[in-house]
Image (cartoon, rainbow, N blue to C red):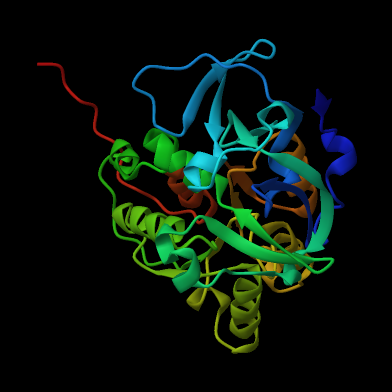
Amino acid sequence: MNQVNQTEILLESGTNELEILEFTIQKEIFGINVAKVREIMKCCPVKPMQNAHPVIEGIFKPREDVITVIDLAKYLELSESNDPKRDIFIIANFNELNFAFHVHEVVGIDRISWRKIQKPDQIIYGGNDGVATGIAEFDGRLITILDFEKIVAEIAPTTGIQMEDIETLGPRARCYKKIVIAEDSMLLSKMIVECLHRAGYESTVKLDNGQEAWDYLCEAKESGDPLEDHVSLVVTDIEMPQMDGHRLTKLIKEDTVLRQLPVVLFSSLINEEMRIKGTNLGADAQITKPEIASLVSIIDRLTNTEQPPVQPVEDN
């Protein structure tokens, strides 16, 4: 077994770089953010589960935790390994859950600037239904960075954002404070915007990455208008092409005008190590992606938005 040492592998905060673990499935090259990876180990026998999703091989227990194994070749509709005994499990953690992704070979780790990662073409990679979150070029190779959160959400929908969670907040008043959202996933950004609208936040600005968000904020600052006319709070993902959420947070908090803006990191990557990075950069709050109701409550608090008290439900 090969455990990934997060204290060594995580990069200096706000550099707009990431480490990609490069792996192959039938010689096709894919990548995963090292911040998601907890361990790399040789493929081992698993216990099949009845009535499971077709791409779930089963479960195994390498230590104290039971981990679900996902066959990436089957999910991507690629052929099986030519030498299964040499296959690899990549143990990943995001959204506070652990999964093992069955791949054919691990190539190595590449350090890449987010500026060199392009959003995949919607036609080629399936638009909202696509499985690629970015295309990176490294040493002449094109690496497809997979959207692992989307893969897991398709297999286990309850692990993703649940719009009905907004109903737990009770009655909500309309609010027109402008919320800027930086999120590269079209599907997730659409869900976040819809959830905020359901929660009463009528005015949202949806941007595809940190660079677009930074450009928008700079234009707002230079417009001469009161800043609150353009933005009251920023919600940002961490993983985004062109500019990531950590770099965006760093730029905002180092700017003499924009530093007053509350910044919320809303990402599947929030764990102990990443929380330290976000805190050091000045993020006002950090929360993992499925917790949409908690995100709304944080926005209420940071924007001083008052809402009607929740009425207790009387027992019949």
Residue 14 picture quarter: bottom right
Q: Position of residue 60 (x, y in %)?
A: 59, 16
- Residue farthest toward the bottom in the current orientation of the protein: 223
208 left or right of 89 in image: left
Residue 297 picture quarter: top left
Q: Is residue 294 visible?
A: no
Q: Position of residue 53 (x, y in %)?
A: 39, 31
Residue plotted at (61% across, 58% down): 262
- Residue farthest toward the left in the current orientation of the protein: 316
- Residue farthest toward the top in the current orientation of the protein: 64
Q: Position of residue 108 (x, y in %)?
A: 83, 46
Residue plotted at (87% across, 36% down): 7
Above/below status of 314 relative to 216? above
Q: How many marks?
A: 0
Above/below status of 12 relative to 74? below
Q: Position of residue 243 (x, y in %)?
A: 70, 67
Q: Quadrant of the N terminus?
A: top right
Q: Is residue 44 visible?
A: yes
Residue plotted at (74% across, 71% down): 115
- Residue farthest toward the front in the current orientation of the protein: 82
In the image shown, does 257 or 203 lie closer to the viewer?
203
Residue plotted at (20% across, 25% down): 313
38 left or right of 10 in image: left
30 left or right of 158 in image: right
Above/below status of 223 relative to 148? below
Q: Quadrant of the C terminus?
A: top left
